[in-house]
Structures are given as C-alpha cells and as structure tokens.
Image: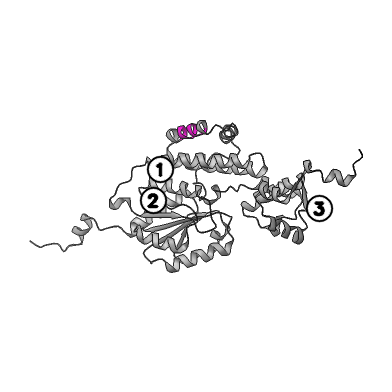
Amino acid sequence: MIFSMNELTLNPATSLGIAAVERETGIGKDTLRVWERRYGFPQPERDGSGDRLYPLAQVERLRLIKRLLDAGHRPAQIVALPVEQLDALARGSGAFTDASTAPAARSIAPEPADSPLVSAYLALLKQHDAERLRRALQQDVMRMGLDRFVTDIVAPLNTGVGQAWMRGTLQVFEEHLYAEVIQRVLRSAIGAVPVGETAQSRPKVLMTTVPQEPHVLGLLMAEAMLALEGCRCVQLGAQLPLADMLMAVQAHAADVLVLSFSPLLQTAQVLDALAELRGRLPGSIELWVGGSNPALRKRLPEGVRVAKALGDLALCVHDWRERHRSPSTTDLLTSQPQSRD
C-alpha cells in the first residue's frame, strides 16, 4: 500500500487531537485556538473529518511554553518563539512554582542549584522513592538545624528542581512528589519548634496568598524562619479571598499579615491587592510581603514592608517588638522622680 505524505503526517500514532493535547499540556482548547489565530502557533494539521491533529513535536513545544507561562512569562512574549529560544529561556530560568514565592536566601551563600548536593537530591527524586527522599531531608534538618536547612538546602534545591522541570528533565509528577515531600518535612520541623504563649511569642502572624497565587512552599520557608524567632504563625493556605483575610486577621487577633508572590501574577494584580488590603486593614496590623514577583521591586503602597531575604524576617520581627515593647521595671524605676533625704 502506498501512503501519501499527508497521510503519513496525519498518522494518529504521531499526532494528537485537541482534547488529548489539552490533557497532555494543561492548555485549554479555546486557548490553543486563540494562539493559532493570534500567534500562528500551534499549526495543527487536519484529519479527514476536518478535526485538528497536532504533531508530537508541537505538543512538546506546547509543554515547554506551559512551563514558561507557569514561571511568569506571558503568551505574547513566548508563544511565537522558535523552540531553540524557548529552550534557552527555560535553561536560564531559575523559576519554580513554590520556590519563587519565597524571599531570597540570606547573605550566607547557600549551595548553588547545580551543586553535588542538589544533584544528589535530584537523583534521589528520580528514583521515585518518596520515603527515602523524606528520610534524607529529615536527616539534613537534624544535622544542620532548621534555619540552615531552609536557606542552604531547600532554597537551592527548589531552584534545581525548577530548572530541571523547565528543561523537561524532570516530569510534572516528579515535581509534585518533591513539593509534597518537602512540605511534609518542613511542617514536621516547624511543629517541633517550641512556641510559648507569652508576650515574647508575638507578633502573631497570619500567612496566606491572594487569589490566583497557588504556591505555598515559600510561605512554609518563611514560617520556619518566623517560628525560630518565637512567633506564633497561623497558616491559611493559598488563594484566600481578600475579604476572608480581613475577617481572619480579626478572628485570630493577628498582629501581622504575611503574603508571598511568585512571578505567576501580573504586576497590576499584585499592586491592586496590596493597595486594597492596606487600605482596609487596621493601621495597627502590619503587612509584610516577600517573593520574586517583579512588582515587589516597585513602589508599593505605604505601610507594606518587603522582606527581600529570609534573614530580613528576623529584622522585621525585631523592629515590631521594639515598637511594641512594654516598659520594663527598670525603665519604670528610672522614670520616677528621685526622693530627697
């Protein structure tokens, strides 16, 4: 039997229908059609019924585009780019779903993302043994202490996982496995930090993310550092509506609201959310933010404090306690008039 070139191109074994592409890439059917008209990519073939069929090479390119979109790029910037440029962007990006939400590492240099330690953890992750990975991470917590574990292990490991995912050498299910294991390890370590119920355990900190910001690992890293400072932290997870944040602050008698922002959100979304929250929060409630979203490098509403590094959180706590310090007995005695003999 003789096949025409068109029949070979449309072989279902080498092409996927639009529904299958949606499942494989996470990009919706309507979005694929819009990109096709607006950017000239993807460029599906048609089967005998006129339905779209996408060659596997285009599906792989769409997967790469989806990774870059999740890292904060916009469709207009990347959809029409050739695969070589997309790959270069992916290799040069340190973005990772949750790592990007955390403040940058402290001034003491952590392990680089391509260090032997990070490579060893990535190799362990590729073995798909979640329990072994968890035990190895827990051993590092005990060996290094929680603060160094967060800054010297978790931060560069997040970047390494993100880079591997962006390059396509780490699958989505493997990235999800890592995120699940590292969150379990961090929650367990945070739970072991003793926190009192005295005035010294203030400020009480409420932690969450705004709608359309699903990443929470950065919040856990920040919580670890705050817990080590003796703060009481209340985690409310991701994507809490702004009105519910305001109610939660009141219900928990929180002193500080902490938010994290990844590059996933556009600048206007970040600035609008911060302006609304700062305008509606009582003046006595402080608003601290961190993350790698470019909006945090712009001029923010008055009364919003940016933690540019994990180490900044300790300074934030120190400053808060200084502003709310109760006069000590010594202060009271020295302020009284001295009696005369």
Identify which amino acid the numbered label 3 is placed on.
Ser
Residue 155, magenta (yes or no): no
Between marks 1 and 3 in the image, the one whose residue lies nearer the viewer: 3
Residue behind mark 2: 233
- Can residue 160 be seen here? The reply is no
Q: Position of residue 186 (x, y in %)?
A: 45, 41
Range of magenta residues: 133-140
Estimate the spatial distance between the alpha carbons at disc 2 and disc 3, rounded to whole Å: 58 Å
Q: Position of residue 325 (x, y in %)?
A: 30, 57
Rendered residue at 67%/42% (across/down): 168
The answer to the question of whether label 1 and label 2 lie on touching residues, with beta carbons closer than 8 A, is: yes
Q: Position of residue 95 (x, y in %)?
A: 60, 48
Mark 1 or mark 2: which comes first in sequence?
A: 1
In this view of the protein, which residue sits in the foreground, 59 or 295? 59
Quadrant of residue 278 within the rendered picture: bottom left
Rendered residue at 66%/50% (across/down): 66
Rendered residue at 81%/43% (across/down): 11
Rendered residue at 78%/41% (across/down): 13
Identify which amino acid the numbered label 1 is placed on.
Ile
Residue behind mark 3: 49
Name the secondary structure under disc 2: strand
User: Which residue extends farthest right?
Assistant: 2
In this view of the protein, which residue sits in the foreground, 280 or 140? 280
